[in-house]
Every structure is written in structure tokens, then in C-alpha cells.
Amino acid sequence: MCGMEKLGGGRMLYHVYCDESRQTADRYMIIGGVIVAARDLPVLQQALQLFRRAHNLTKELKWTKVTDQKLAEYRALIDLVFSLSGALHFKCIVIDTTVLDHRRYSKGDKEVGFHKLMYQFLLHQFGGYVQEGDKCIVHLDQRNSRYKLSTLCAILNNGLRKKRKGQIKSDVFRNVEAVDSKTSDLMQVADVLMGAIGYHWNNLHVRPGARQAKVLLADYIATKARIPSLAQETPFGRRSFAIWHFKLRSGPKE
């Protein structure tokens, strides 16, 4: 499990950093993020800052910026991330956008539909980390949206109480807030991992003209995760690196 910060009475505080990848461009959309304990946050941030200095990387880390010239640096980033897997856990869900029906299930509002999917992701991938009395702060990449994040926070707390009936009685999710990904190294780490996963799920690595650096980095991530390909679900219960193929049957539920 991630490290823990003791608050009072043994309670823990977690931070979750989330983003989405390939929401409109390809068939499979990825929603993913990392969870860390507040106690571990300074150490993780320092490790990433030292990595940046060592490799002279001053700008935003993104999957779209993986090039032949920067492949060695991004491989080193992946090495660092997996070396920190005891304190940093990555989760994602893969959604087939061809079966989404926002008109039927979200009154035609794609933003509502997106946040229903984000709700499913946060509840089922990170809800198992918390116990009664713990707190969790969710940081989402900024979006141009009318959707109120306070609404997402409220339905997360309601959903967690229903899912963990008898175990969770209080509001565990303290806040859901928007953050500029350019200011968050942990959100940028999630972006790189999600980009690679989307690359495999959408078969971009086998298309003519596929950028070799991205092909090699995606394969490298799969090797570090000890799976044959990123285009598959990981076994149920995996904690440090998990891929969940979200099979939508009756539309996202609140």
C-alpha cells in the first residue's frame, strides 16, 4: 500500500492526481491517475525535481513530447516511477467511446457523461484505499467545463458510503479541485503512462509511420509493468499499476 500520513487517531490523508487521454481523437479513451499518501508527497516531488535537473528537463512532461531525441530521458523517467511504486500507485480505465451514448444517459451533455466516467474511475480504483476517518483530495487537470467539481465530490462521498456500507460513514473525499497539469509533476507522470496505454489500445504502435520512440517507450513500460502488452487488463487486485477495461453496458451510473 502507499505510505501513510497520520492525522489524528490513526487517520490517513491521500492525494489523487488524475487526467484523461484521447477523449475524442481515437476509439479508446483513457482516464487515469496516481495516488500517493501526503506523507510521501515531499519525497516524491523532490525525486522528480532531481530527475528534471539531472536530465535538464524544464518543460512539461507529456506523452506527445516523446521523441527519438528524448527517448533516453523518458525511459529514465519510467525507471524512476517504477522504483517509487511502493509510494506511488497508478490506475486507469479504458473506455470504448463507440459505445458511449451521452444523449441517452447524460441528457446529451458530454461533460456530464465524462464526469460520470470519472466518478466510476475514482470510486472503484481509489475508494478501496481509504478507511473510515481517512481523507482524500482529488486533483483533476483543468478543463473548460460547466460541470461543478463540488457535485463530483458529493456523489463520490455518497457512492463510497453505498459501496462500503457499514465501513464508511463520513465524507472521505475532502475536495475535488482543478489543477493546471503544467504545475504538477505527478499529473504529468500520469499523462505519460496513459499516453502509452492509449497508444497500444488504439493500435497506433503498428500503424505506418508510428514514431519509433513512442513504440519503444510503450513496450518498455509494458516490460516494467510485467505484462506482454499495455492493450490488456491487468489481473484483478494489482495495486501499483492497474489497467481496467470498463465495459459499459447500461451507461455510466451516478
Image: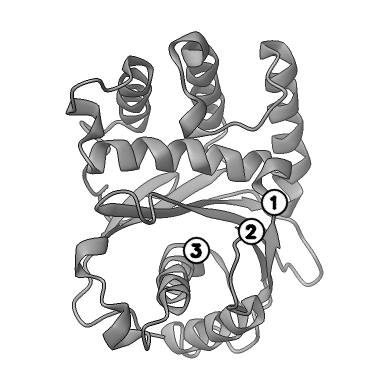
Q: Looking at the picture, does residue 172 appear above or below residue 92?
A: below
Q: Residue 126 carries which label?
A: 3
Identify which residue is drawn at 78% across, 72% down: 9
Q: Which residue, given by chain and number where applicable, does mark 2 sit on?
A: 142
Q: Which of marks 3 and 2 is nearer the N terminus?
A: 3
Q: Earlier in the sequence, mark 1 or mark 2?
A: 2
Q: Which of marks 1 and 3 is nearer the N terminus?
A: 3
Q: Which of 101 and 158 is in front in this view?
A: 101
Q: Nearer the viewer, residue 188 or 1?
A: 188
SS at mark 1 in the image: loop
Q: Nearer the viewer, residue 94 or 203?
A: 203
- Residue 65: horizontal and vertical position, in percent? 51, 26
Q: Nearer the viewer, residue 26 or 9?
A: 26
Q: Which one is closest to the eye, mark 1 or mark 3?
A: 1
Q: What's under tag 3, amino acid-wise?
A: Phe
Q: Looking at the picture, does residue 189 appear above or below residue 56?
A: below
- Residue 227: horizontal and vertical position, in percent? 25, 34
Q: What's under tag 2, amino acid-wise?
A: Gln
Q: Which residue, given by chain and number where applicable, does mark 1 sit on?
A: 180
Around disc 2, counting alpha carbons within 10 Å, would you say few (fewer than 14), some (14 to 19), or many (20 or more)? few
SS at mark 3 in the image: helix
Q: Which one is closest to the eye, mark 3 or mark 2?
A: 2
Q: What's under tag 1, amino acid-wise?
A: Asp
Examine the rendering and report whether any part of residue 13 can be seen. no
Identify which residue is drawn at 71% across, 12% down: 54
